[in-house]
Image: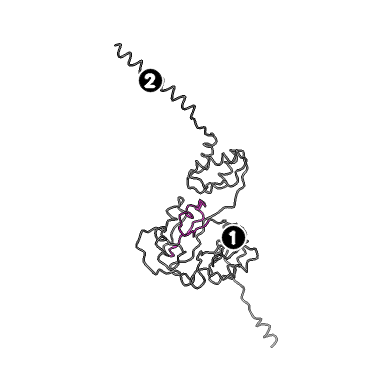
Amino acid sequence: MNDILIAVIVLGGIGLVSAVVLYLCSKRFAVYEDPRIGEVGELLPGANCGGCGFAGCGGMAEALVKGADKGSLNGLTCPVGGSEVMTRVADLLGMAIQNGAPQVAVVRCGGTCELRPKIVQYGGLRTCSAMHACGAGESACGYGCLGCGDCVAACQFDAIHIHPETGLAEVDEDRCTACGACTRACPRGIIELRRKGPKGRRVFVSCVNRDKGASAMKACKAACIGCGKCVKECQFGAISLDGNVSYIDSEKCRLCRKCVDVCPTKVIHAVNFPAPKPKPEVVEPIIKKEEEA
């Protein structure tokens, strides 16, 4: 009986000492977490897409709280939640935010199967990254969309698909959150986040081919030939020519669409604009001539 009692006392003493040690360690090495981080995290959508520039919504919440402590949330935005979520976060933290212009992913390639025919058959791993590592792909253009769908696999919002006829990636702008996952997944840098524009209207060069005009056109009939006509036509300095390919700055573009009209290869695309009104036919005054006769 005494042996049992002694064992119970010893075990109880060990447990008591262990509890005291654990309590002291928890106090000594405790990591303080601002309770606002959890509150902000609950307001974020929880997509953990990385579009904000952080590993997940937890990292974004921590950055927002730190930004509030420094007095500014500028440069911090949740592309999935948009201005609505950021406004609620700002209200919680007692801060003001500068809402940036809404963005959308844009696929800068117009080389359909018809305009950029296949010249070889690829038999390797069917991913864009693998095909790009092997060379130009199945066509002669080493810059165009490979159509294997790495961007599709990266998108968590079902906002991008490969068109079965053109073989090109296409973005559903109603679903796109501008998280940037597709831009990071594309090994050729074809997909770009651009300003969505008023009423979803935007103008962009649908080509990234840096080859010279003749070589570019040989590889794809929808290539920019670097002629510079669009640069000369733009009155706002929104278009630049770099590496034989034009680029339109969405911040400077005034959506006049004059560049669209002068492009000889029709590689500049205007999206969501109303159809142009048909020009009225000129009718000669036949009746007047008959009266004179």
Task: Tell which tag, 1 or 2, sits nearer the viewer.
Answer: 2
Q: Nearer the viewer, residue 92 or 187?
A: 187
Magenta stretch encompasses residue 191: yes
Give the residue type at disc 2. Ile
Stretch in magenta: 165-192
Image quadrant for the C terminus? Answer: bottom right
Q: Position of residue 65 (x, y in %)?
A: 56, 39
Give the residue type at disc 1. Asp
Q: Nearer the viewer, residue 113 or 27?
A: 27
Determine which residue is flagged by label 1. Answer: 249
Q: Earlier in the sequence, mark 1 or mark 2?
A: 2
In this view, 223 is above or below 61:
below
Residue 266: quadrant of the picture:
bottom right
Q: Position of residue 21 (x, y in %)?
A: 44, 23
For mark 1, give the secondary structure: loop
Image quadrant for the N terminus? Answer: top left
| Residue displayed at 41% across by 62% down | 164
Magenta segment's dominant SS is loop
Please tell me how crowded label 2 is: few (under 14), some (14-19), or many (20+) other residues with Cα within 10 Å. Answer: few
* Residue 215 shown left or right of residue 260 in the figure: left
Determine which residue is flagged by label 2. Answer: 14
